[in-house]
Amino acid sequence: MYNITLIPGDGIGPEVVSAAKKIVEATGLNVNWDIVNAGADVYKKTGVLVPDEVYESIEKNKIALKGPITTPIGSGFRSINVMLRKKYNLFSNIRPVKTIPGTDSPFKNIDLIIFRENTEGLYSGIEKKHSENVAEATKIVTSAASLNIINEAFAYARKNNKKKVTVVHKANIMKLTDGLFLDCAREVSKNYPEILLDEVIVDNMCMQLVMNPSQFEVIVTTNLYGDILSDLCAGLVGGLGLVPGANIGENMAIFEAVHGSAPDIAGKNVANPTAIILSAAMMLNYLGEKEKSNLIIDAVIEVIGEGKFLTKDLGGIAHTADITNAIIGKIQTLK
Ligand code: NAD
């Protein structure tokens, strides 16, 4: 029996998280879900953004599946997502981006994975307003956090027989901060002589990704670049509805889709639940339930490949509940 914290979140969160919960249950995994919530909706009702029970549940279970949480733009509270990653030192943000056959996207053979540093960089939350017209943000890069994520990327590359790790930086301009990140990558790469260290400046990386994405296998980068490149890569394979993610630390992990709360489509039963369902599959793999994890991935690939139950973002008319039920049906036949 696994005890897993389940955080529905805001916007489309409750719709897609409930789909992922059903899918995990359909695999036969024995789960005791600890359902707690945080975010803008909770704040409206209670005046508290993250109730204590959320922290308590995550700290007890050490594993969570989380829906997206709305963060106000400009003013208002800091991102709860960024705060949770920092508070629990979930230093690896891992985002696999893979073509699912049957999706209508310009590229057909993308299979890359982004390792994004998750606790510092420009997301350290240190900002100052000096006057009405002058503001400052502090970018922090430490070798400890950089080595953590870079080691993860190389270890993954070795384990999965990947030939190249691409470190994305802007060390030509940000000489000290990105320079340190790059130095750490060069240092780690010495322990992996069979893997090529490919160094690419972030602006060139954007161009390379939209011209020829299949040249990349493993990408490792700092917090902000990783955030931006993840959405860019999601666009290459058919959109944010498809790309899962994991935030992993020493002995704790929170799984969530790359996408946000999508307020434009919330409450309409049209959100694509695939990204959070694949995040749940990553969670099962992390728990050592590889067979059940693969069962979910295979069912998703088959349902999307058949093209009968596609949500609007994939060019179809199916509702969230339709594609969810189709995946559950597929799991029953594949089991
Ligand atoms: P978004 O990812 O919510 O949406 C961007 C676009 O993609 C929208 O058009 C949306 O409809 C579409 N989209 C996203 N997910 C989809 C899905 N599953 N199915 C179909 N279409 C989907 O990005 P945004 O609009 O910039 O952000 C909205 C809110 O989410 C903001 O408050 C932001 O801070 C927050 N956010 C949270 C997280 C997180 O919790 N981890 C991540 C990113 C953004």
Image (tube, rainbow, N blue to C red):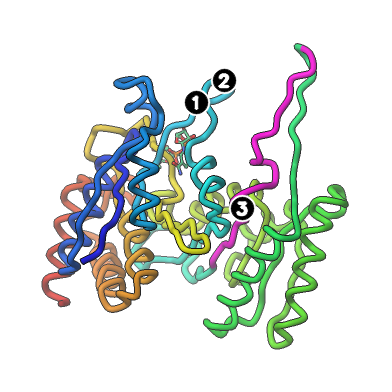
The crowd level at tag 1 (other Cα within 10 Å; few <14, some 14-19, many 20+) is few
For mark 2, what is the residue? 75
Closer to the camera in the image, 267 or 279: 279
Q: Is residue 135 magenta?
A: no
What is the three-letter code of the residue carrying label 3?
Gly
The crowd level at tag 2 (other Cα within 10 Å; few <14, some 14-19, many 20+) is few
Q: Which region shows up in magenta?
A: 113-131
The kind of secondary structure element at disc 2 is: loop
What is the three-letter code of the residue carrying label 1?
Pro
Q: Quadrant of the N terminus?
A: bottom left
Closer to the camera in the image, 96 or 66: 66
The disc at residue 72 is: 1
The disc at residue 226 is: 3
The kind of secondary structure element at disc 3 is: helix
The disc at residue 274 is: none
The crowd level at tag 3 (other Cα within 10 Å; few <14, some 14-19, many 20+) is many
On screen, 135 above or below 222?
above
What is the residue that sits farthest to the bottom in this orientation?
Answer: 194
Q: Is the Cβ of the residue at disc 1 closer than 8 Å to that at disc 2?
A: yes
What is the three-letter code of the residue carrying label 2?
Ser
Specify whether tag 1 is near ligand 1 (CB below 8 Å): yes
